[in-house]
Amino acid sequence: MFLSPFLARNRYPCVIESTGPQAALQRSDAVKTQIREMLAQYASLPSAAGLDDDADLYAAGMSSHGSVQLMLALEDTFDVEFPDNLLNRKSFSTIAIIEQTVNQLVAGKEAA
């Protein structure tokens, strides 16, 4: 069992028990859980815990102000910066899209 160095330095660490496809699935679930918690805390969307990954967050009640607060929390938590081309409604429209975007930003940062 190991603690991912990336996740260890962030507010929401998670333990990954193995490598490979199962570990990737565990990381994905952990990131989605973090996103749901941040939606409730920063985007005033307490119903996020019960939403499907592909549910429209704006239809569920997230405001544009909430999406900005969420973006700032994501940047702080995952130590990334959203580039201008991702500062749009679509990038924050579902939990699945947010998770995918965060993973891409983290991977890009680690590759640099």
Image (cartoon, helix red, strand yellow):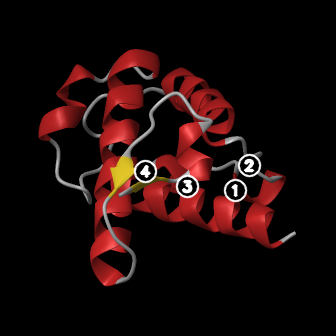
Mark nearer the N terminus (4 vs 1): 1
The span from disc 4 to disc 1 (Cα, nearest Å) is 12 Å
The answer to whether residue 94 shows anywhere in this view is no
Image coordinates for residue 81, horizontal then vertical, percent: 77, 45
Q: Where is 64 relative to 17, above or below?
A: above
Residue annotated with mark 3: 91
Toward the bottom, the furthest residue is 20
Along the horizontal axis of the image, is 109 left or right of 38?
right
Kind of residue sitting beneath label 2? Phe
Along the horizontal axis of the image, is 22 left or right of 107?
left
Image coordinates for residue 48, horizontal then vertical, percent: 24, 34
Mark nearer the N terminus (4 vs 2): 2
Query: In terms of depth relative to the viewer, which is nearer, 92 or 39?
Result: 39
Element under disc 2: loop
Q: Residue at x 27, y 76 (%)?
A: 22
Q: Quadrant of the N terminus?
A: bottom left
The span from disc 2 to disc 3 (Cα, nearest Å) is 10 Å
Q: Residue at x 58, y 23 (%)?
A: 69
